[in-house]
Image (spheres, rainbow, N blue to C red):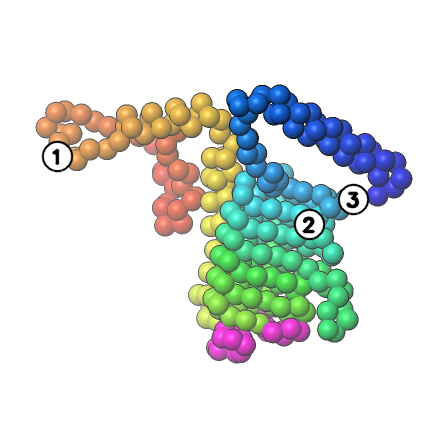
Amino acid sequence: MGSLGRAVYTLGNWIRETGQAMDRLGCRLQGNYYFQEQLSRHRTLMNIFDKAPVVDMDAFVAPSASIIGDVQVGQGSSIWYGCVLRGDVNSISVGSKTNIQDNSLVHVAKSNISGKVLPTIIGDNVTIGHSAVIHGCTIEDEAFVGMGATLLDGVVVEKHAMVAAGALVRQNTRVPFGEVWGGNPAKFLRNLTDEEIAFISQSALNYTNLAKVHAAENAKSFDEIELEKMLRKKFARRDEEYDSMIGVVRETPPELILPDNILPDKAPKAAQ
């Protein structure tokens, strides 16, 4: 950050502090009528001085996620609820159509025992399961990291490799192409089957499609949400026998129908 940028940042800080002081004064003047307002300071995207996240417009970042500092998120990727990507002392790069699932943590290393400066690099079409910890490592394209796994500094997970759920992969370990590693500490278990390798790509695609639904839901206004509640109540399906007795035919309005590509086993409807 240059001298001009720091001056603007300092000025902004003074203005905010002035506003806070005025708020405290106003509270004292209210006397017995004063009440404390609790405001959330959560920010989905947050700078660290001149280090700012760069998130593709087509990516989904859940409202409760936190992307901080020098972080890049590619097209079609999804950062789910409760995730933290903290690029403060180094950089984080997330490729395209990669999903980092709920409550996962991604961080970096400025220094370690090996003396290496380690960013975190995550490739394309990667699936990272819920509550995983990724620290200063590299995950190549179309790799899979299971739920609750921990990857430490210098780990490399090669393309089409899988780290099993709950595994602890020690520093500077390389998980080779097409292998499954698991345990604490993680060791080679077996080779992936062709079906499992295909599933990794399909898993990434499923999450890309699902993220579009969540992005649309999170973008809805209060009025739109209330309208959908009313529609769901109005068009709630009763027992088919009951409906036939009273001659009711219920049709679900288009607003309440999920896109076909969200459910992989649901074939697109043929044109009438």
Q: CA distance from mark 1 to mark 2?
A: 56 Å
- Name the quarter where the C terminus is drawn: top left
List x then y, in percent, for residue 141: 61, 60
The residue sitting at 89% across, 39% down in the picture is: 3
List x then y, in percent, for residue 182: 50, 73
The image's mark for residue 71 is: 2
What segment carries the magenta color? 170-191
List x then y, in percent, for residue 113: 73, 73
Q: In the rendered image, which quarter is residue 46 located in?
A: top right
| Residue bearing the label numbered 3 | 50
Horizontal side, residue 174 vs residue 15: left or right = left
The residue carrying pointer 3 sits among few (fewer than 14), some (14 to 19) or many (20 or more) residues within 10 Å by Cα, namely few
Answer yes or no: is residue 53 visible.
yes
- Nearer the N terminus, badge 3 or badge 1? 3
| Residue bearing the label numbered 1 | 241
Q: Give amino acid for label 2.
A: Val
The residue carrying pointer 1 sits among few (fewer than 14), some (14 to 19) or many (20 or more) residues within 10 Å by Cα, namely few
Marks 2 and 3: which is nearer the front? 3
Relative to the observer, which residue lies in front, 129 or 84?
84
Horizontal side, residue 14 vs residue 68: left or right = right
Q: Give amino acid for label 1.
A: Glu
- Nearer the N terminus, badge 1 or badge 2? 2
Q: How many marks?
A: 3
Q: Give amino acid for label 3.
A: Asp
Marks 3 and 1: which is nearer the front? 3
